Amino acid sequence: MRQIMALLILAWPGGADIIDRIAVTVGDRVITESMILDQIRLSAFYEDREPEFTPAARRLASETLISRVLLLREMDDARFPEPPMSAVAASWREIQADRHWDENALRQELARRRLEEEEVRRFLQLMIRSVEFISLRFRRGVQVTSGEIAAYYEKEYKEWWIRQHPRQPVPPLDDVSEDIEGWIIDAKTDTASEEWLKQARSAAKIRHREE
């Protein structure tokens, strides 16, 4: 699910408090320097790590925002609905619980990272919408045969299990076939989304504006 997660750990930030420089254009859509900086902050917050503002990190952020523009256009063209705010609130509570933050600690962390709570909520809303859209567009209808499950078990699962549990016997295929089927579906979904993104990028008029 690497490509899917790359698409999901994105944001389309709001306005900035500085005069923006246009960094990238995707057709008639604009990605500004402040959007790239906000993208770095938001993805670092979501992944619970410190942001990096190196040239390489900025380039990666701009590339992920390009992917986001293309995905947003696809979702909007399909009139794919926004998730309910109850789903956003549940995701927000999960982050707080996982990191053991009370309201005061949360406010301090957002201030330290130069983020607003509303920014993060919009980020989570977009993530949820993207997950649901990708599942509908690329995951639903994926078929996995018993032969594929057996091959995965022999070639990958056994090796993985031995590395992770060196002193335990490998579970029989019947006990793990459902898990393996899910992993294969994830891989096929990832491949399909990568191919779609590759085609969308090749068809889009993308221009990087050097500083």
Image (cartoon, rainbow, N blue to C red):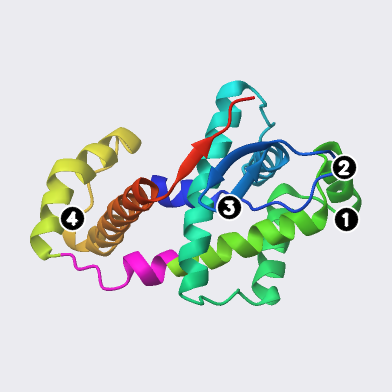
Cα distance in 3D space between marks 2 and 1: 12 Å
The C terminus is located in which quarter?
Answer: top right
Judging by the rendered image, the residue that carries numbered circle 3 is: 29
Front-most of residues 83 and 95: 83
Front-most of residues 153 and 169: 153
Instruction: Look at label 2 and name its amino acid.
Output: Ala
Q: Is residue 154 above or below residue 162?
A: below
Q: Which mark is residue 172?
A: 4
Judging by the rendered image, the residue that carries numbered circle 1 is: 103
Crowd class of label 1 (few under 14; some 14 to 19; many from 20; radius 10 Å): few
Instruction: Look at label 4 and name its amino acid.
Output: Pro
State the residue at coordinates (48%, 58%): 71
**Percent coordinates x, y for residue 3 in the rendering:** 40, 47
Q: Is residue 83 left or right of residue 135?
A: right
Magenta stretch bounds: 134-144
Front-most of residues 98 and 207: 207
**Percent coordinates x, y for residue 90 in the rendering:** 68, 68
| SS at circle 3 | strand
Q: Please say if the residues under marks 3 and 2 sit with CB atoms less than 8 Å apart.
A: no
Q: Is residue 40 left or right of residue 28?
A: right
Crowd class of label 2 (few under 14; some 14 to 19; many from 20; radius 10 Å): few
Q: For the residues carrying marks 4 and 2, which lies nearer the camera in this image?
A: 2
| SS at circle 4 | loop
